[in-house]
Amino acid sequence: MNKKIKLLTVTLLATVSMAFAQNSKSTWPEMKTFHSFMSSTFHPVEEGDFAPLKAKADSLLITANLWQASAIPGDFKPAETKAALANLVNKCKALQKAVAAKQPNDKLKTLITEAHDIFHTITGECRKADD
């Protein structure tokens, strides 16, 4: 009898945990990784410091590609998210090429700002509405 109560308790807890997990926003590790590179490059540029962007442009592109290749969580709109991620990768490619070509800082600022805006489109507009 004691084993049945324990089994029932574990089953009930697992069911409640799964139900809660389905209702909460998902975690997307690749998005978090990209965000860490985006924030460490974009925010210094806002203050006029382009060194982090120039040093991490390759990493920003790599993490954008990894994010694009990852599975889209269920609480995101698949078509919109896929399209926005493709735009983000293209913008990061352009940014990486501009850094490699030693383009002027104003050009780099425009590109990182556009990439930042796309990032926020994904994290905001591409999410499904809460029911």
Image (tube, rainbow, N blue to C red):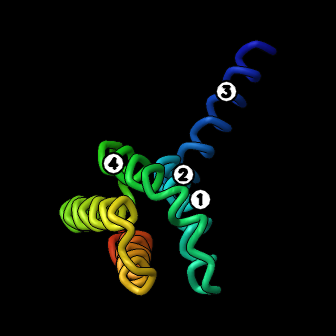
In the picture, measured across the screen, residue 40 lies left or right of residue 71, that is right
- Whether pointer 3 and pointer 4 mark residues with C-beta atoms closer than 8 Å, the reply is no
Residue 82: name its quadrant: bottom left
Q: Earlier in the sequence, mark 2 or mark 3?
A: 3
Q: Residue at x 62, y 77 (%)?
A: 49
The label shown at residue 33 is 2
Give x and y (percent) for residue 79.
18, 62
**Secondary element type, mark 4:** helix
Q: Identify the residue under disc 1.
A: 36
Q: Identify the residue under disc 4.
A: 65
Kind of residue indicated by mark 4 = Asn
Above or below residue 106? Residue 115 is above
Q: Residue at x 36, y 74 (%)?
A: 103
Q: Identify the residue under disc 3.
A: 8
Q: Residues within 10 Å of mark 3 (few under 14, many from 20)?
A: few
User: Which quarter of the figure is the N terminus placed in?
Assistant: top right
Q: Residues within 10 Å of mark 4 (few under 14, many from 20)?
A: many
User: Which quarter of the figure is the C terminus placed in?
Assistant: bottom left
Q: Earlier in the sequence, mark 1 or mark 3?
A: 3
Q: Residues within 10 Å of mark 1 (few under 14, many from 20)?
A: few
- What separation in Å lies between label 2 and label 4 (alpha carbons)? 11 Å
- What separation in Å lies between label 3 and label 4 (alpha carbons)? 44 Å
Q: Nearer the viewer, mark 1 or mark 3?
A: 1
Q: Nearer the viewer, mark 2 or mark 3?
A: 2
Kind of residue indicated by mark 3 = Leu
Kind of residue indicated by mark 1 = Ser
In the picture, measured across the screen, residue 103 lies left or right of residue 60, that is left
